[in-house]
Amino acid sequence: MKALNKLTAPKSVAPEKIIQFGEGNFLRAFVDWIIWNTNQKTNFNASVVVVQPIDKGMVEWLNGQDCLYHVNLQGRLNGEAVNTLERIDVISRALNPYSQNAAFMALADQPEIRFVISNTTEAGIAFDPSCKFSDAPASSYPGKLTQLLYRRFKTFNGDPKKGLIIMPCELIFLNGHHLKKCIFEYIDLWKEDFGADYETFKDWVTNYNYVCATLVDRIVPGFPRKEIAQIQEKVGYADNLVVQAEIFHLWVIEKPTNMSIEDLRAEFPAEKAGLHVLIAESEAPYHERKVTLLNGPHTVLAPVAYLSGLNIVRDACNHDVIGKYIYKVQFEELMETLNLPMDELKQFANDVLERFNNPYVDHAVTSIMLNSFPKYQTRDLPGLKVYLERKGELPKGLVLGLAAIITYYKGGVREDGAPIQPNDSAEIMQLLTDLWATGDTRKVAEGVLAAKDLIWGEHGDLNLIHGLTDMLTEFLNSIQEKGMLETVKSIL
């Protein structure tokens, strides 16, 4: 079998326009795949320089294959199973700034560099006051980026056309806002290092650099250990950097305050390539849509499915009863609480169901059950309250989902003998143990709903929501007496 490198496989050459902080599976299967497709279908013609954000990483592996690798997409598209393999060649080279700092800083001198993309984990966008401007490099990602920006400012004498478009992909809400704040904290921290340049550099960053908040969505399982031999046989290369991902992808890019949507679309034409890349005024409604229509149903389907004897998300979707329950929660309840156009919401919800029904991924419902109460508080409770406000009645599917979580946290075993093993904070676990020890479902319902400091936070005591305590108690009684499946049937 052939080694994979530019001598054994064709590799395109394009101007280096993008600096990418991060070399992991997600960026290679999401951002780099998007850039590769954009190059194929538009005149974008860009390549990516990868920068390893921490001291230990995998740039040597990447360079060992001349930054060539395959992406294996699996899932359902328009009802059909899809399993594709594509060789991605947009990464020109990979640098370790801890051992190649001069080469890293020299990226700032390249006139065609225009974009910075990152995924340095949720902890990566953070201000560390111990970073020094003289560090080579600064330990934090925002520190490294500020060093790079200053070098570019000096190289091009504050040229307004040489600012950068910065699109972080870390999985935190308003990631770009947090990153921008960190950059200015470093500018102020290093004020004395910048000397007379301080004010003009700060103005240049403010006016001619463009920091976007983004929302990214693609499940990336990563290296396909089980199937790697078959994949290598199929592609004909000993590719040790294959990355597996679902076929669904969505990248919402919020326009920066100092650039128009039209200008950003012109510079980054991924939408023209037919990709699910959306440049929008705000990412907030799309973040809310994802949390509500993907994470929300996930959170309640897991305990309902498990207590009904089902172990895999896909099997739950295809079950005669639980499948209808999932549809009810998603389309008839949660969708009614959002403010985007209904056709957009229906399309997204249908995409979510296809993702849940992925034939290539056995997604265990128990893996979703970790910390279910905090998840319900952020993903489902807001929808429950909006639904009640708009419809004048409680959403039965969401309330039943809460009853299922409470029942799951009772522990014990399922009817078929499978263990029920809840996992949450010690305080929440103790609360549920104490409440169930009373043997009174009304006290269980009231106690959970009253746990404002432990679970519900700013939502307060949920016993004050009209009718919720009564409905929750009824569902808890029904589950104890009839079982989960019969209780679900009663609301369909």
Image: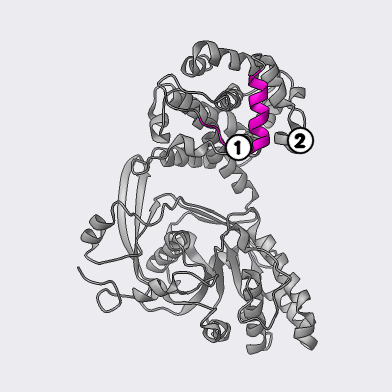
Estimate how packed mark 2 is, as few (under 14), some (14 to 19) or many (20 or more) residues with alpha carbons within 10 Å.
few
Q: Residue at x 61, y 70 (%)?
A: 141
| Image: 405 above or below 198 | above
Q: Which residue is mark 2?
A: 453
The amino acid at mark 1 is: Asp
> Where are the magenta residues, as a range?
421-437
Q: Quadrant of the N terminus?
A: bottom left
Q: Which residue is mark 1?
A: 424
Q: Residue at x 42, y 26 (%)?
A: 418
Whether residue 412 is visible to the viewer of this picture, yes or no, is: yes
The amino acid at mark 2 is: Asp
Q: Residue at x 55, y 14 (%)?
A: 480
Task: Answer with mark 1 or mark 2, whichever residue precedes in sequence.
Answer: 1
156 vs 310, left or right, is right
Prevalent SS, magenta region: helix
Q: Position of residue 354 (x, y in %)?
A: 41, 40
Q: Residue at x 51, y 72 (%)?
A: 52
437 vs 412, left or right, is right
Q: Position of residue 154 (x, y in %)?
A: 67, 88
